[in-house]
Amino acid sequence: MPSRDAFREECGVFGIYGHADAANLTYLGLYALQHRGQESAGIATWNGSRILVEKEMGYVHDVFDEARMKRLPGKSAVGHVRYSTAGESRLENAQPIVYNTNKGPLALCHNGNLVNADELRHELEEQGSIFTTSSDSEVFLHLIARSRQENIVSALTDALLRVRGAYSLVLMSGERVLAARDPQGFRPLTIGRLGSSWVVASETCAFDLIDAEPVRDVEPGEVVVLDVGGVASASFAMGRRTAYCVFEHVYFARPDSVVFGRSVADARRAFGRRLAREHPVKADVVVPVPDSGVYAALGYAEESGIPYAMGLVRNHYVGRTFIEPKQAIRNFGVKVKLNPVRSVVGGKRIILVDDSIVRGTTSQKIVRMLKQAGATQVHMRISSPPTMNPCRYGIDTPHRKELIASTHDVEATRNFIGANSLGYLSLDGMLTAFGRGEDQTCAACFTGNYPVKWEDMPEQRTLFEPVAIGEVDDEVDDEVDDEVDDEVDDEVEVEVEVDVERKETALDTALDIPADECVPAIAVEPSKE
Ligand code: SF4
């Protein structure tokens, strides 16, 4: 049987080529990407003869101190922040994953979720591969090692043609840094320039922190190589149906990033403006649920002419763990993060704007808090359609039966959260504001139309809210219909074309080092060739 350990990822990746301060810049890049994963952080560098890696559970600033950074010399580096659910919160799943392979030492960072990882892992295990993590990301390294192609770009391309699903990858091969994005482009990945150095990151906010200039996105179905020759590009499946994750713009990406060529803040404002047109209501003040509802609330206020005010204050210093009081305090979990401003909400009719409702319990508590603080009415407005389906492509969502919209219609949800009215942005409204049609977008968590087939794999869960609602209908099970778009399947056409004429460099020779000189090696994949 293939491993049934769940593959649950939500991550940020970063890479840099050709800078004397590569590790420190990677640290800063990861710092900016911390919102994409808080479970573990890691950096690997190439010191001229071997890969060095430091990784640990925890936040970036907790994992890396001065002593640790000093152990990461080199001009090339890759880094990773990872989110995982409880039970998988293990150091061996932290990235970069470093392997000695017959293609040389490699350090891999992955954001996304593969839908055929179980199947591939089973096949690889049958052939003798030994996995050291429960992460789907390790599949890439085994496939690269088994490729009969000797060149790392061709071997990576070989591997990418076997996998299906979402991946934005950064791979260090000796001094070279490679980056690749799946043919649908689910997750963002973008290239920047810092003087004569090249950087690649999940989001442009990582460039801002290090004063790098954004250059362009890694295109869906493209591999880029950053090395002494500059930036080279190899296409393995470009020009196919894209499936940009609209949820990146709804919730996940930072508003100061440009994702899929569009400012996230601008997209969220557009969602809010559209929401105001679709669901107007008489009220005194527009209040966002911070931080995710801020820009949509600004858009709603602009369009409606109703004043905007921060009626909820967020405590930004809440860590992942805190000591719970022995005596139960009502709404404790929400109160520790959010507190109403009585002078703003007291005696007011409030339009409360959030990005989504997942289980409904958090919304219920916020509505209750606002009413306890004196709000006379609370009208909930959501800047996306009802979230009815789990994500299969790398965002950690609850099981379908835990999603309130899958079992409750709008009126039942309104009743559950205790709002005076409830309005969701329509699918058409969201996509219009996103600026792309459904044929270029993944909106499966709203529509159930999954653009890439997925295997029977455990659902991801619980990024958003810590407790389950009790009133879900168990008759609605986890089965998601198999309505998939067969036009986008696993038969990706093999088409490798190197756009920039490249010659083998001294770096290729540098890769030719004895495997035992690459430390620390998390695992050694013996050559099967
Ligand atoms: S299912 Fe939702 S969260 Fe997942 S990739 Fe599609 S739009 Fe994004």
Image (cartoon, grey):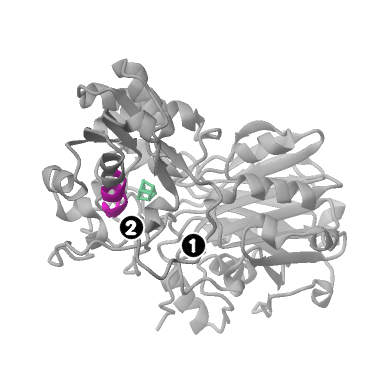
| Residue 431 seen | yes
Q: Is residue 503 left or right of residue 290?
A: right
Placement of 295 over or under 181, stated as above or below:
above
Identify the residue position indicated by label 2 in the image: 453
Answer with the quarter of the image where residue 65 lies: bottom right
The kind of residue tagged 1 is: Arg
Residue numbers of the magenta segment? 357-366
333 falls in the magenta region: no
Task: Give whichever of 186, 331 is nearer the camera.
Answer: 331
Q: Is residue 359 magenta?
A: yes
Judging depth in this view, the residue of 67 and 390 nearest the camera is 67
**Quadrant (top left, top right, bottom left, bottom right) of the N terminus:** bottom left
Q: Please give the label number shown on residue 162.
A: 1
> Vertical placement of 135 versus 157: above or below?
below
Q: Residue reaching furthest top?
A: 305
- Where's the C terminus, which quadrant? bottom right
- Rendered residue at 52%/43% (across/down): 188
Residue 401 — which label?
A: none
Residue depicted at x 65% and y 32%: 214
Residue 157, percent from left and from top: 58, 56
Whether the residues at callouts 2 and 1 have beta carbons within 8 Å, the answer is no
Circle 2: residue type: Lys
Estimate how packed mark 1 is, as few (under 14), some (14 to 19) or many (20 or more) residues with alpha carbons within 10 Å: some
Does the magenta stretch mainly form a helix, a strand or a loop? helix
Distance CA(mark 2)–CA(mark 1)? 14 Å
- Residue 371 position in % (x across, y down): 25, 40
Residue 498 appears in which quarter of the rendering?
top right
